[in-house]
């Protein structure tokens, strides 16, 4: 009985690490206020406040395998959360756009460590369906509980005071830093080779690179919703920053709900869960495009988020399967880097496309996002159907049963 309680507490601590992994998107709920606050800059530049964390997330993610071999998990956890907190709260004290963007980059460095770290720790303690379930709970459920909190609280503070106050919500993860650092046990470290970056890059299969590339485009397209829904709601006077934050939070709430069932879904539908998730995301965003009422925008956001709750853990689980931990090679950072790259290219991709069509941002961006996602789903579905290696495979590495250390 005591051991069961200890294992349950271990699971709680592990998934808690993911609480802040999508909190960088809090800027989306106050984007309209930020654009007003910096009228001398084009919206695509101001949107870097929301997307630049993704760019800086790339670097520690790509080198995560080497970082994990060089440092303990507790050291990486402390460093990642500390960077996240510092980069998150500093914009409260600053009114210079480029310095704010720089600190948001520091926040991204923190996420670039904690995102693959959370998957790595789960794989260190658990395997099989239990591992998939925890990945779903971490990357979807817990991360989105955090996102709901950050986005709604940030929007409410911005409405009540000013946009700077929205960034004070980044003080909240201090308790997560404390509890996980104090009580999360260090997994047993394997004696493995310190694989070079060149070896990691060239040992990755076509499947790893295919999933990584797909994740880049998926994230870039989804960010069209994240950075524009606030503008639509406030420009069309459907609501304030609080309602905009609520819409994004409902998007992440949909992700949260699906996270509870991801392990079961992946077991029943291992090859086609990701294309289905992409279609679901597209359907939600397309519904937002047509919705003229705030209630329908909320409902559509929930549907779109359910798709996100399938795609993100689906990609992370598949890439984790293909890692070779026994040789010191982890590809989880690839997926984290892909999310970061997709976020940073998103505003420029949309700006170029909108200019080509002679359109401006807002609703038309949502239309482009939905069409792009539908196209991505079809391509992903065709490739998956044609691939004889599409079935989920388990690596030879079996995580050590370290739950006894608690």
Image: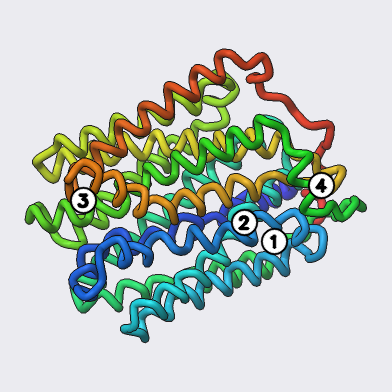
Which secondary structure lies at badge 4? helix
**Sooner in the amino-acid sequence: mark 2 or mark 3:** 2
Q: Which residue is mark 3?
A: 361
Quadrant where the C terminus lies?
A: bottom right
* Tag 4–tag 1 contact (CB < 8 Å): no
Residue nearest the observer in this picture, 303 or 365: 365
Determine whether, in the image, residue 72 is placed left or right of residue 240: right
Q: Residue at x 17, y 45 (%)?
A: 358
* Image color mode: rainbow
Determine whether, in the image, residue 202 is placed left or right of residue 163: right
Q: Position of residue 330 (x, y in %)?
A: 74, 46
Find the residue positioned furthest to the left. 237
Give above or below for 46 relative to 344: below
The picture quadrant where one finds residue 387 is top right
Quadrant where the N terminus lies?
A: top right
**Sooner in the amino-acid sequence: mark 2 or mark 1:** 2
Q: Position of residue 22 (x, y in %)?
A: 45, 55
**Sooner in the amino-acid sequence: mark 4 or mark 1:** 1
Give above or below for 167 relative to 245: below
Q: Which residue is mark 2?
A: 13
Q: Residue at x 70, y 48 (%)?
A: 7
Residue 150 in sight here: no
The picture quadrant where one finds residue 152 is bottom left
Find the residue positioned furthest to the bottom. 93
Task: Find the distance from the CA under tag 2 to the CA under tag 1.
Answer: 6 Å
Determine whether, in the image, residue 80 is placed left or right of residue 355: right
Q: Which residue is mark 1?
A: 184
Eye-nearest disc, 4 or 1: 4
Which label sits on residue 199? 4
Residue nearest the observer in this picture, 133 or 192: 192
């Amino acid at each position: 009985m005591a051991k069961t309680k200890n294992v349950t507490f271990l699971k709680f601590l592990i998934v808690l690490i993911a609480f802040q992994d999508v909190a960088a998107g809090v800027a989306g709920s106050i984007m309209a206020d930020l654009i007003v606050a910096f009228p001398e800059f084009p919206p695509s530049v101001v949107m870097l406040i929301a997307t630049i964390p993704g760019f800086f997330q790339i670097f520690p993610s790509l080198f995560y395998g080497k970082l994990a071999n060089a440092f303990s998990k507790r050291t990486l956890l402390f460093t990642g959360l500390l960077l996240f907190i510092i980069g998150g709260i500093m914009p409260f004290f600053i009114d210079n756009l480029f310095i704010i963007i720089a600190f948001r980059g520091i926040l991204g460095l923190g996420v670039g460590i904690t995102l693959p770290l959370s998957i790595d720790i789960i794989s260190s303690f658990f395997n099989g369906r239990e591992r998939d379930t925890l990945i779903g709970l971490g990357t979807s459920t817990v991360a989105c509980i955090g996102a709901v909190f950050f986005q709604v609280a940030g929007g409410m503070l911005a409405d009540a005071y000013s946009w700077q106050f929205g960034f004070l919500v980044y003080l909240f993860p201090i308790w997560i830093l404390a509890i996980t650092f104090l009580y999360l046990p260090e997994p047993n470290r394997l004696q493995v080779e310190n694989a070079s970056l060149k070896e990691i890059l060239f040992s990755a299969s076509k499947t790893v690179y295919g999933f990584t590339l797909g994740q880049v485009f998926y994230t870039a397209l989804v960010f069209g919703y994240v950075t524009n829904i606030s503008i639509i709601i406030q420009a069309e006077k459907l609501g304030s920053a609080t309602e905009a934050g609520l819409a994004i939070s409902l998007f992440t709430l949909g992700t949260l709900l699906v996270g509870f069932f991801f392990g079961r879904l992946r077991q029943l539908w291992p090859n086609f869960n990701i294309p289905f998730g992409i279609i679901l995301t597209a359907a939600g965003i397309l519904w937002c495009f047509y919705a003229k009422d705030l209630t329908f925008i909320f409902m559509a956001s929930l549907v779109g988020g359910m798709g996100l709750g399938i795609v993100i853990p689906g990609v992370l689980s598949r890439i984790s399967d293909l890692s070779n931990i026994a040789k010191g090679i982890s590809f989880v950072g690839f997926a984290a880097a892909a999310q970061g790259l997709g976020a940073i290219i998103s505003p420029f991709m949309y700006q170029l496309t909108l200019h080509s069509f002679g359109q401006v941002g807002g609703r038309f961006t949502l239309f482009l996002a939905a069409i792009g996602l539908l196209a991505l789903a079809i391509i992903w579905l065709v490739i998956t159907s044609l691939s004889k290696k599409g079935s989920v495979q388990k690596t030879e590495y079996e995580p050590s049963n370290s739950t006894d250390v608690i």
